[in-house]
Amino acid sequence: MALKVALLGTGNVARNSYLPYLAQRPGVTLSYLSRTRARAEACAHDFGGTVAGSVEELMAGEPDTVLVLTYETQRYDAARELLAAKPKRVFFEKPLVAMNGQANVTEDDFFKARELLALAADAGTETAMVFNYRFFDQTVRARRVIAEREWGKLRQATLYVNYACWSHCIDLLGLFGGRLKRITALGGGTEYQGAVDVAAAFELESGAVGTILGTSGCSFDLPLYEMLFNFERGLLRFTDLDGPLEIFDPALRYIESHGLRAVNHRGQQYGDSFGKSLAGYLDSVEAGAPPPIPGTAGLEELQFEAALRRSVALGRAVDVATEFPMGL
């Protein structure tokens, strides 16, 4: 099946993370739209495809999907204009909306993102998200272990996260445990580029409880995150993008530690995950199946962040369903 893939935004993310896979996938034709036409033309020269001068011209090519790869600070306005043209499908980079940057998500970002998904629903547009950490080898193995060994529901979780990985790790918490119910948070400590540390205790709708700490204060020479997920019949520990997955199974007498080979490092693991994410998504488009990660996953991640920020600002617990309803 021939696929027409349009890219809205042709910056470094598109060039470095998306186009290397798209350009080598058989049957894909590319088109581009960028605020800076020269960047779009450079992508067309290097990876093939055509350049459009407007949303109308981009949509005249009847793309099967549009990848929205603009800066998160520009994504809301760009997506609104695109959705007015009623594309068949839209695939969003993360976070869905972050008008002040991904380390400074606000309550308004959640409501703007909810508006985008409502506009998409009205237009009959299918939405999807990237969240490529779901395609890390460690994550794929962990999901298989949970299912095959029938570990049951998540009971507790503890997350320590550098803001560089923040939205991804919140998404993984949702993947393993479900949607947020209530959160109580504090802010302070290290400040870096306007982002202060946050620490929170939370309860999920599933009944699982846990804690999360977000920071820009840890060095990139150190692990960027550590996450513990304790299920009814087993425990998982993740450390960094290329760190080992440790599996603690009480039914066995040993601890499993699954590390990547030495040739795999943080950058390679991260880069490879985009190709895996795109492969899964485009396979679903070809099959006429739902996307691996729906657009609502992006809204749930922002719901978590917005509720956390409100709790910090008001110094009280936040009931998420009441104060930040999904409304979809």
Image (tube, rainbow, N blue to C red):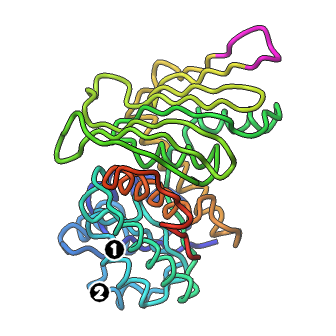
Q: Earlier in the sequence, mark 2 or mark 1?
A: 2
- Secondary structure of the residue carrying tag 2 is loop
The quarter of the picture where residue 197 lies is top left
In the image, residue 292 above or below residue 208: below
Q: Name the residue under label 1.
A: 76
Calculate the distance from the C-alpha at mark 2 to the C-alpha at mark 1. Answer: 17 Å
- 128 or 225: nearer the viewer: 225
The residue shown at (41%, 51%) is 316
- 289 or 139: nearer the viewer: 139
Residue that extends furthest to the top in the rendered view of this protein: 253
The quarter of the picture where residue 228 lies is top right
Q: Is the magenta stretch mostly helix, strand or loop?
A: loop
Q: Give the range drawn in magenta.
A: 249-256
Q: Name the residue under label 2.
A: 54
Mark number displayed over residue 86: none
- Whether the magenta-drawn stretch holds residue 240 is answered as no
The residue shown at (33%, 22%) is 222
Instruction: Please state which of the two labelled residues, at mark 2 or mark 1, is closer to the viewer.
Output: 1
In the image, residue 65 above or below residue 95: below
Quadrant showing the C terminus: bottom right
The percent coordinates of residue 288 (x first, y second) are 70, 73
- Whether the magenta-drawn stretch holds residue 254 is answered as yes
- Secondary structure of the residue carrying tag 1 is helix
In the image, taking residue 238 as reference, residue 110 lies left or right, namely: left
Q: What residue type is labelled 2?
A: Ser
The quarter of the picture where residue 208 lies is top right
Q: Which amino acid does label 1 sit on?
A: Tyr
